[in-house]
Image (spheres, grey):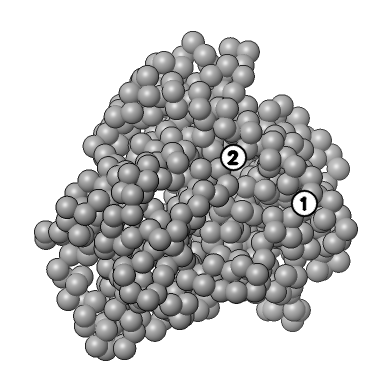
Amino acid sequence: MTVGHVLGVAASVTGRAWVGIDPAQDRAAEALVQSTGLPQALCRHLARRGVAADEVESFLAPKLRDLLPDPLSLRDMAPAAERLLRAVQKREKIAVFADYDVDGGSSAALLIWWLRDLGLGATLYVPDRIDEGYGPNPTAMAALARDNDLILCVDCGTLSHDAIAAADAADVVVIDHHLGGETLPPALAVVNPNRQDESGDLGHLCAAAVVFLVLVEANRQMRVAGHKGPDLIAMLDLVALATVADVAPLVGVNRALVRQGLQVMGRRARPGLVALADEARLDTAPSSYHLGFVLGPRVNAGGRIGAADLGARLLATADAHEAAALAARLEVLNAERRDIEAQVREAALAQAEARGLDAPLVWAAGEGWHPGVVGIVASRLKETTNRPAVVIGLEGGFGKGSGRSVHGVDLGASIQKLAAEGLLVKGGGHRMAAGLTVAEDQLEAAMTRLSELLDKQGAGVGGPQDLKIDATLMPGAVTTELIEQLEQAGPFGQGARAPRFAFPEARVTFSKPVGQGHLKLVLSDGGPVRLEAIAFGAADNGIAAAIADAAGAPLHFAGRLEVNSWGGRQTPQLRIEDVSRPI
């Protein structure tokens, strides 16, 4: 079905076409307006997402109890929950081995808070990214097994056969979401929706969400025995943080988990998250944007360039003073991380451009590049090129790298195949993100082969992503009430983009550079209403230059609407994503 270019924009300032909804969606949107009485702007967005008239109410107010899957639909769930409860009942010693990212830290914190509510402590172990690498290792696992009865591996462990075998003095339960291999490690239980013998229906869950399901089943077993378990709803702030930070798609139960988790977070009851929000000067109700771009990077900073367990300790602490100290340390580390990232990003982009940005895989590798930032830089390359990207830091004849993928291309499976073929020392992950270790003398061959595997999935056919526009609006139509109604379709993020609108022939009546390369604007269509706007990265993406060249002449603007809170005042604001000159 033909979809026209909105406002005739086939190639904007950033090289993208502006694409509207198709005729069938247009008709569906009009029907939604008539049957629901909701604003047309919201109905057009709902139509694009395929929400039918009889689904609107449940979509705009999703209930977790209606969407939460039966935990027992996952293999090994019953024995995992039973073993956890037996450890609680017998007051056994428990260790939590967690990955060093937000998902791992949140997963560990969930277990630690749950156990604390039942009067039991746990030993937290987070491996050092540089010295130990990702996942369990035999030395650490053997040491933990000597001192503990039960080891819970969270957000890791599915491929750790040797490491888990080394922990034979203790029981090991793996709670993970990374892609499994043909065989499972010798653990008591492996709860993972991405095991090869699972259906994959829950493959979009992050590890913290899988941990949450384990605790739901443990609480159920406690109720059957006549006991009341800890309040799991109060822990959804941790699940929401992990889901967004791990770039899990915000669809189905994930959307409900994040939506309710944001409400829990807004109560400011978790000392670590309160301290982190205060350190980041977050003075508004949290949104999925804040989880992904404000709080998440700070939690991650410890695992990237500092002490690996700082983020997990922050999320797990019940002490406000300890939380404040940890949050302050993470704030400093995050600033250092940004500086290191900027240096690596500049070098990686130059190398990738020299190699060519139109291949199925965009990649770069450099001596001494910090392994803690290569994943972020890979994300930047992916966003710039709309291609899967891999960035690798080389040291001592080996490279440690991270990759990020685009929609429809399973990077984790390709990385795992590469490891099986012997071109990688090790590698794994999930559809959208993966990690790898490669011998330097195998680097070129490995990347060539990876490019071939990704090309077969269609990774080489995409150009600049079209900008999908839900509707055109005039500045006078934008109110805080409209934005609040649009927010009912959220939270927005991976797999659930926010509504996007085009504003035709608006003039810039005020312009001011802010921050590092950003632009603060006021737009007008000639009427009495002015619309405040912000264009992030405008100095780098050509938007600032286009506005300057227009010299006050009208331009088409496209972006997302938000409420800007400043000094106790709330005003509508357009977050500008693109600009085009009228034809």
Q: Give the image quarter of residue 338.
A: top right
- Three-letter code, disc 2: Pro
Q: Residues within 10 Å of mark 1 (few under 14, many from 20)?
A: many
- Residue shown at 26%/63% (left/top)? 504
Q: Which residue is mark 1?
A: 327
Between 361 and 356, the residue placed more toward the observer is 356
- Residue shown at 45%/58% (left/top)? 510
Residue 106 spot, x, y in % from top left: 67, 55
- Residue shown at 48%/35% (left/top)? 378
Residue extending farthest to the left is: 2
Q: Which residue is mark 2?
A: 185
Q: Name the N-terminal-most of marks 1 and 2.
A: 2
- Three-letter code, disc 1: Ala
Classify mark 1: helix, strand or loop: helix
Q: Is residue 536 left or right of residue 450?
A: right
Q: Is residue 207 left or right of residue 325?
A: left
Residue 317 spot, x, y in % from top left: 81, 58
Residue 511 spot, x, y in % from top left: 46, 54
Q: Give the image quarter of residue 339.
A: top right
Classify mark 2: helix, strand or loop: loop
Between 208 and 58, the residue placed more toward the observer is 58
- Residue shown at 65%/45% (left/top)? 300
Residue 221 spot, x, y in % from top left: 67, 72
Q: Is residue 134 left or right of residue 392?
A: right
Is residue 170 among the parts visible in the rendering?
no
